[in-house]
Image (cartoon, rainbow, N blue to C red):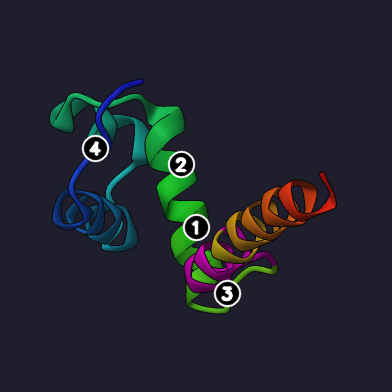
Amino acid sequence: MPRPYPPEFRARAVALVRSGKQVKQTAYELGISAGCLHGWVRQDQIDRGERPGISTGESADLRAARKRIRELETELAIVRQ
């Protein structure tokens, strides 16, 4: 699995696009794919409330809740044995 880019790098890339630079050119200059940068920009728009969707914070909460559910299901399976 590829290592994720640091949050500071992502924020800087998104800021460049928000300032008016084209996604394709910005991605080329930073050495990342345009699709990756499009995703970051899209998520930034969701987090800012400019686009509907699940925010980064909500996504983290949902991931934690699903993990906890799996743990509880495992515990329940052990108790039932």
Quarter holding the C terminus is top right
Image point (50%, 64%), residue name: 60
Residue 9, given in percent of the width and then of the height, sits at 16, 49
The image quadrant of residue 67 is bottom right
| Magenta residue check for 16 | no
Label 2 element class: helix
Give the spatial CA distance, label 3 vs label 1.
Answer: 10 Å
Residue 80, given in percent of the width and then of the height, sits at 84, 51
Give the spatial CA distance, label 3 vs label 4.
Answer: 21 Å
Q: Which residues are magenta?
A: 53-63
Image point (46%, 41%), residue name: 38
Location of mark 4 (residue) = 26
Label 4 element class: helix
**Dot 3 amino acid type:** Glu
User: Dot 1: within a 10 Å radius of its alpha carbon, few (fewer than 14), some, or many (20 or more) residues?
Assistant: many
Q: Please identify, in this view, whether the residue under mark 2 or under mark 1 is nearer the observer.
A: 1
Earlier in the chain: of badge 4 and badge 2, it is 4
The image quadrant of residue 68 is bottom right
Earlier in the chain: of badge 4 and badge 1, it is 4
Q: Please identify, in this view, whether the residue under mark 4 or under mark 2 is nearer the observer.
A: 2
